[in-house]
Image: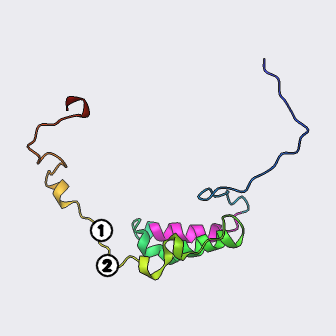
C-alpha cells in the first residue's frame, strides 16, 4: 500500500509550451470551431477552402488566452502561403492496379544485407 504525500508547499503553474493548447472548457470559441468543422465536412476535408474560418478560430483562441498570441502570418496565414488552384488527387493509378514500389526491378536490400 502506497502512501499519499500532500505537500504544503506552494505549487507553481507554468504556462503551456508552444503547440500545447488548453481546452476550451467554457466553449468560448465553439461557434468558430463548429463553423470551421462544418466547412471541412462540406468541402470534403479540403482545408484550403476553409482557411478564413480556421484563421477566425485561432484568433478567437488567442483573444481569450486559450493559446499564446502569435502573428497569424507566421502560422501560415500570410498571402504568400495561400493555396491556389489546388486539385484533389483522383487516385486513377491506384484504381488501375498500380502499387507503389512494384515497378522497381531491383533486388531488395535491407540495411542488414549491405
Residue 110 x/y as whole percent: 22, 34
Q: Find residue 58 and name its label.
A: none
Q: How is the image coloured?
A: rainbow
Name the mark nearer the viewer: 1 or 2: 2
Q: What element carries label 2?
A: loop
Which of the two residues, 55 or 96, is positioned nearer the viewer here? 55
Q: Residue furthest left?
A: 105
Residue 34 x/y as whole percent: 57, 67
Q: What element carries label 1?
A: loop
- In the picture, the quarter occupied by the N terminus is top right
**Residue 81 in the image: above or below residue 94:** below
Q: Which residue lies furthest to the front in this view?
A: 114
Q: Find residue 88 and name its label.
A: 1
- Determine whether, in the image, residue 88 is placed left or right of residue 41: left
Q: Find residue 85 and name its label.
A: 2
Q: What stretch is highlighted in magenta?
A: 27-40
Q: Is residue 63 magenta?
A: no
Instruction: State the image quarter where residue 20 is shown.
Output: bottom right
Q: Residue at x 41, y 65 (%)?
A: 45
- Determine whether, in the image, residue 16 is placed left or right of residue 82: right
Amino acid at each position: 500500500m502506497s502512501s499519499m504525500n500532500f505537500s504544503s508547499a506552494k505549487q507553481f503553474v507554468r504556462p503551456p509550451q508552444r503547440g500545447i493548447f488548453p481546452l476550451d472548457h467554457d466553449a468560448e470559441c465553439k461557434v468558430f470551431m463548429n463553423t470551421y468543422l462544418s466547412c471541412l465536412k462540406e468541402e470534403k476535408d479540403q482545408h484550403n477552402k476553409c482557411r478564413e474560418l480556421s484563421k477566425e478560430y485561432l484568433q478567437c483562441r488567442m483573444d481569450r488566452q486559450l493559446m499564446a498570441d502569435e502573428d497569424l502570418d507566421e502560422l501560415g496565414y500570410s498571402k504568400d502561403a495561400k493555396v491556389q488552384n489546388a486539385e484533389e488527387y483522383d487516385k486513377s493509378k491506384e484504381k488501375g492496379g498500380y502499387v507503389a514500389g512494384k515497378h522497381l526491378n531491383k533486388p531488395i536490400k535491407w540495411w542488414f544485407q549491405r
